[in-house]
Structure formats: structure tokens, C-alpha cells
Amino acid sequence: MDTNNVCAILELSVTFDIEDLRNQCLGFVANQSESVLNGDEILDLSRESLQAILKVERIMSGPSTLFTSCVKWARHQLQVEHSIKDPNDLQIRKTLGGLLYEIPFPAISATEFAHLVGESDIVTNKEKSAVYYYLASRRGKDKLKFRTENRHERLVNLATKCTKGLLPQSQCSACGSFKKSTVELSFKTNKDILLTGIGFYTAHNGSDYAVDIQVIQEKDSLLQDKLMVQHTENSTSKVSFDKPVSIVQGMLYKISAFAHKDIGYYGELCSEICVDDVTFAFVSVSPNASAFGLFGAGVNSIATSGQIPQLYFIAVKS
């Protein structure tokens, strides 16, 4: 499955009601949405398949990309089905119908919304007014027809340099062998976010591996699970949480992860990085840290030089 064929496979899964394949396709589209939604393959999707994409819980693209892609899809439908070479806004609006309300316009700024739809008639003046009022006052949510939750998932690349090989600090000074260890990452943010997943480096031997993950705030465990890190052609692989973890600005959080196989890469970690006005400040972890006792005695806990190179999150609008 790749960006060139995922739309065709999704269409087949919807047509023949193959739920597992449908979910795989939607997961791929969510992670590669910029490439998929900006490509031409999406133009041939059915309304049902496009709606399935618009309804996914987390997606890397924001409302602007979703809207632009939907308009492009509607234009194509009008050209193919009705031979309308240059459809107007009202024809596009009629073709989109309820699909338009799946786009979370209230999750963007008033300026971005104005640039996006201000001079078109695809969104009615009444709908525009309702969105502007909500953006300015955070009131009138019950009068909005559009989805209001922000599903635009951002990616934070923490590692400034990637090196192939086993992490040097995991080698035993006494016997020279490499030990499987708990890797850790401590961080604060300047704004409230929802942590939706982690990007791990892939395994040393190129296979999939299981990883025990815990997200901790002081001594409270906010998430504890065993998930699989899939092998990819790239050095990193995304692990998504079933339920996002709420991160409160200014508070210190720790991610502890124990990989059941050797990780094949490591990198140099940033001390601070900003993505879409959300600043992540990272704190070094002592090589002898206990990981709050997560994995018990006998497991060597090491400082992360960058074996957790990516975080996925959704910004929480105030």
C-alpha cells in the first residue's frame, strides 16, 4: 500500500465492506494525508469513501487541506458526471452537501478561515457568521453545523541527527554486551495538547518489535500499554495511542518505553522545539533513573539520546 494506490484499495474495501482493510487504508491516509489529499487519485473516490476519510479521528492535515481537496473532488465530479467544465461555487456546494460539515473550520483562526472561504459562496454567509462568532467569543457552538474538534495531528521531530546502530550507553561497561533498557523522555509544553502517539526508531534487525509504554505525570500513570513498532523502509515508525493523553501546559511529563528487541538507531535530542506555537522543552534524564519503578528492579534505565525521535500531538485551542 502506498500513496498511489491507497485510494483505489480504500474504494474496494468500502464497495465490498471489508472493514479491516478499510481501517488499514484510513490509517495510512491519516498518516500520509498531505500526499494523498493533494494527489489526483482522490478525485475518483466515491462520496462514501471521501466521507470516511473526513471522519477519521486523527489526521495529519488541517481544515485548509481538507477543504481544498473536497472542492477539487467536487469540481471533478461535476466535470465527469455533468460535463460542467467550470462549475460555480453554488454547484460545488450542492455537490459537497453534508461533506462540508465534516471540515472543522472552527478549529482554525479567524484569519485563516477568512483567507480560505471569505470570497467564495461555498460556505453561506450565515454559516460564515456563525463560525466568526464562535472564533471570537467561543460561544454559539450549538448553532454550528461544522465539526468543532481539532483533529489536525502535528508531528514534532526531536532528533537533530540520526545514527544507525545500537545506542552506545546501552553497552555494559563490565562485560561489553548490549542490554535492553528503558528509554525515557521528559518534557514540558507551553500550551495544552493531546499527545496522540510516538515515533520510535525501527529495530536493529529490521523486524517488528513490541514496546511497553508509560506516560507519567509525577507519580500518576496516564497511559500504560504494550504496542507494536512496525518495521518501515524509513528509520522511524509511528505508534498511535488508542486514546490521546491530555498534557497540561507547564507540567513535567515523562515517557518511559521498554523495547523487547534492540532498537537500530539513535540520535541527538533537541533541548527545545516549537511547532505551530506549541513549544516543547525537553529535560535530560539521569542514566540511573528508576523510570518510577515501571519495569521493576534489574532493568537498566538509560538517558535517551534520541531513541524516541518523534511525538505526535493535537493542539488544544483555548
Image (tube, rainbow, N blue to C red):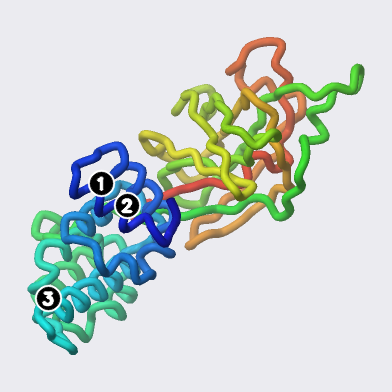
Tell me which amino acid carries mark 3. Glu
The label shown at residue 81 is 3
Q: Is residue 318 left or right of residue 254?
A: left
Q: Residues within 10 Å of mark 1 (few under 14, many from 20)?
A: some
Mark closest to the chain's N terminus, 3 or 2: 2
The label shown at residue 94 is none
Q: Residue furthest right?
A: 174
Cα–Cα span, label 3 and label 2:
22 Å
Q: Residue 227, position in %: x, y?
A: 49, 28
Q: Residues within 10 Å of mark 3 (few under 14, many from 20)?
A: few
SS for dot 2: helix
Q: Residue 82, position in %: x, y?
A: 9, 80
Residue that appears at 70% across and 16% down: 299
Observer able to see residue 27: yes
Cα–Cα span, label 1 and label 2:
6 Å
Tell me which amino acid carries mark 2. Ile
Mark closest to the chain's N terminus, 3 or 1: 1
Tell me which amino acid carries mark 1. Ser
Q: Residues within 10 Å of mark 2 (few under 14, many from 20)?
A: some
Q: Which of the 4 image quadrants contains residue 204?
A: top right
Q: Is residue 13 left or right of residue 253?
A: left
* Front in this rendered view, residue 237 or 253: 237
